[in-house]
Amino acid sequence: MNYGGLEQRNKDGNTALHLAVKSNSTSTVKELLRAANNNFDLVLARNRLNQTVFDLPECSPEIHTQLLKHYNKACLLETRDTTVNFFNLRKTIDGAGRLPAH
């Protein structure tokens, strides 16, 4: 996915979010998560050492909490969207939201 450049990496495979966590910049982490628009791909991105932002030793408890909130919200939204799409598909099948008789 394209997040307006947020997915770009440096030579070590770190994203901007990795670098913000490494520098312990809570405000930058919050801004990057806001820019990620409730997508969790950036939080799960791995660098060349196979580390996500959660794995970084510099990840403070406050930043860890922000990352978890973002990840949980993104997961809930994706689950909701999947559920809505499933019910829309069912409505499309027979026009009334019922699955056709077998």
Image (cartoon, rainbow, N blue to C red):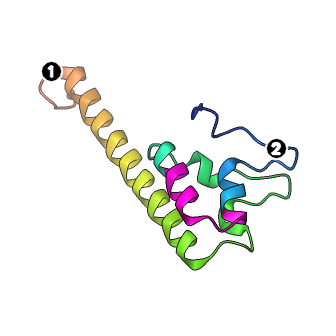
N-term mark: 1 or 2:
2
Image check: 7 left or right of 28? right
Q: Residue at x 72, y 38 (%)?
A: 8
Mark seen at residue 10 = 2
Q: Residues within 10 Å of mark 1 (few under 14, many from 20)?
A: few
Instruction: Residue 10: tell me if it is visible.
Output: yes
Name the residue located 85 percent from the left edge and 52 percent from the top edge. 48
- Neighbourhood count class around disc 2 (C-alpha, 10 Å): few under 14, some 14–19, many 20 upward: few
| Left-right relation of 32 to 6 | left
Q: Amino acid at mark 1?
A: Gly
| Magenta segment includes 31 | yes
Q: Nearer the viewer, mark 1 or mark 2?
A: 2
Vertical arrangement, residue 82 with respect to residue 90, above or below: below
Q: Secondary structure at mark 1?
A: loop
The stretch in magenta equals 21-33
Q: Is residue 62 placed above or below 20 in the rendered structure?
A: below
Pick the quarter of the image with the N terminus: top right
Q: Quadrant of residue 26?
A: bottom right
Regarding mark 2 in the picture, which secondary structure is present there?
A: loop
**Whole-percent x, y for residue 64 in the image:** 57, 71
Q: Which residue is mark 1?
A: 95
In the image, residue 64 above or below residue 77: below
56 relative to 96, above or below:
below
Front residue of this view, candidates 2 and 20: 20
